[in-house]
Image (cartoon, rainbow, N blue to C red):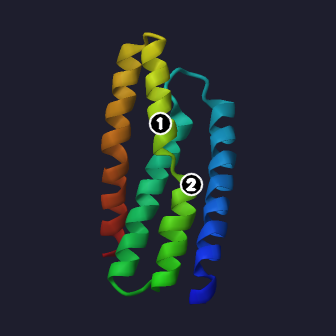
Amino acid sequence: MAMFLPVLVCLSGGLGASCRYLLDTTVKTYWTRAFPMSTFVINLLAGLLAGLVAAAALVGGLDESWRLMLATGFLGGFSTFSTAINEMVTLFRKRRYPTAAGYLLASVVAPPLAAAAGFMLVA
């Protein structure tokens, strides 16, 4: 498996990006307010899953190859910090300052807390 690991990580990244697209369009179908809820939910979920993967790898229940495919591949393709920053800048440019500030704060604080929660669930 080690020989094919780079390819598997890339494929996992593509799967993560596809899942992000599906979740993004689903949330945007129902959420039409200024706050970019879809990206926030995606990054919050990615943080939780990253914590689960990290804890599983730490306690020995997850092989290194699987950790790379899940954390680096899938979650790397699924999460989207760059989109969050772009959405925050767009809110500032539209002069939606309270929403932009709240989104920035929530995007910086909530995903690491979700990662810690995921880690504590396993460890």
Quadrant occupied by the C terminus = bottom left
Image location (x, y in percent) of residue 57: 39, 79
Horizontal and vertical percent for residue 108? Answer: 33, 41
Q: Is residue 17 above or below residue 120?
A: above
Pick the front one: 31 or 72: 72
In the picture, the quarter occupied by the N terminus is bottom right
Q: Nearer the viewer, residue 98 or 120?
A: 98
What label does residue 84 carry, if any? 1
Q: Amino acid at mark 1?
A: Ala
The answer to whether 66 is drawn above or below residue 115 in the figure is below
Q: Which of the 4 image quadrants contains residue 9?
A: bottom right
Callout 1 crowding tier (Cα within 10 Å): few <14, some 14–19, many ≥20: many
- Residue indicated by mark 2: 78
Give the quarter of the image for residue 61.
bottom left
SS at mark 1 in the image: helix
Is the residue marked by circle 2 packed among few (<14), some (14-19), or many (20+) residues within 10 Å? Answer: many
Q: Position of residue 39 (x, y in %)?
A: 53, 39
In the image, what residue occupies the spot 41% across and 55% down?
47
Could you tell me which residue is drawn at 30 percent across and 67 percent down?
120
Closer to us: 3 or 104: 3
Q: Secondary structure at mark 2?
A: helix
Q: Which residue is found at the position 34% from the left and 24% from the top?
A: 101
Q: Amino acid at mark 2?
A: Phe
